[in-house]
Amino acid sequence: MSAGPGWYPDPGDPMQLRYYDGGAWTSHTSASSTSSTGAPSSTSPGGIPPLPGGYASSSSYPGYSAGPTGHGQGQGPGQSQPTYLGAGQGYGHAAPGYATAPGYPVSPDGARASGERWPFVVAGVVVGAALLIVGVVAWGAFSQGWFDGGPTPIASPTSQADPPTIVDGTFAVDGTTIVDVPRDTLVESVVDLPTDGIYLITVTSTDDSDPFLALEAPDGTYAEADYAPAPAGSLGLDGDDAALVGWYTAGPHTVTASDYYGDPARMEVTITNLGEGDGALVDGVTSSIEVPADGLWIGYLDVADGASATLDARTTSGGDLRAALSAWDGLVWENDDRPQEVLDDVGGDSLDPYVTTDVLLEERLVVLVGDFRGEGGTADVTASTQP
């Protein structure tokens, strides 16, 4: 049994709602009108695929969170989506994402009889409660169709039943398009990426709106962003702008621009084909790079199955660097100033960034290095993978 179109609790954020169109989750979200009464289930409404990228938190270091449990392969959208093998510890921080929390049973309040005065009463209450629980579970199982051979919805749509409006746009590779987005509207455009390679896709605000960017490949693999990686500040992007930078396969991709809160907005959508960028970093080998003024050094690093990656960037010209490792689905690990733990472990200067990812399956990460003040300069960067 499949759930109908409507607004459901977001599987990754219990404080908001996400629209399900009857066949798949959309990128449209809305603030929840009521607080959550319980932790969301780790499953989705019947027939609804879970949102890609279940992100889980970690307390390893300040500003750090673990990567998604549904992270895709480095080939990018168009390929299958493996899962993380586990959460690795890291420095820097990962982009916010989705998490599914386990449900916790809640015990009823009530006085407890003393152990020896009412042994039979207590035993009777316990047995009765157990039978009641079994009955409730059995009723729930049959009423929810657990035994009818198909999944069922875990929640009903909220009263916000109107789907978001989707309008066609025309976004071009190596071009910028000005988009006027009406309230509660998604602007979509099918964009044919001509070659495999690094693409930088940005949605910038011209009116203090909060852009939200999504990209979907023909096979349904999905990437999204609500903010830009920190090094992209060298390109003039700010915290309210959205950017995806990843290695994507050639072919038609659906790019969607909207306001995160559904407000009307004017935005600029820019898609840039960077090819192979400044080239590949060799695992464990230090490379001398040149960081352009008001720009980024952009390369890539291949990570094998079951490995994590680190990026150690050290200025050789007195700059104040920022660095990031970016995955195709929008997950970003980034750092500005290395914490004391890293200084103690590997040395370097406190202003030099040091980035560590989680444990991944096969992945091609994009490497971003820029200067905090937008100044040009030189640096030595070492990218390493750890099995």
Image (cartoon, helix red, strand yellow):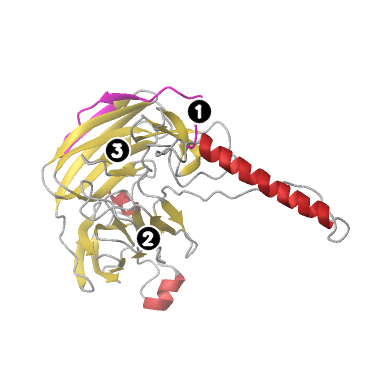
Closest to the observer: 70 or 61? 70
Residue sitting at x 40%, y 77%: 345
Residue range (magenta)? 154-179
Q: Position of residue 75 (x, y in %)?
A: 20, 53
Q: Sequence order check: which comes first, mark 1 or mark 3?
A: 1
Does residue 336 lie above or below 95 as drawn? below
Q: Is residue 262 visible?
A: yes
Q: Residue at x 67, y 46 (%)?
A: 131
Report if the CB atoms under discs 2 and 3 are less than 8 Å apart.
no
Residue located beneath label 1 in the image = 158
Instruction: Tell me the residue that label 2 is attached to.
Output: 335
- Which of the labelled discs sits on residue 203, or is there none? 3
- Specify whether residue 178 is painted magenta: yes
Residue 201 left/right relative to 7:
left
Q: Is residue 112 visible to the viewer in this orientation of the structure?
A: no
Give residue 297's position: percent from left, percent from top: 22, 57
Name the quadrant of the N terminus: top left
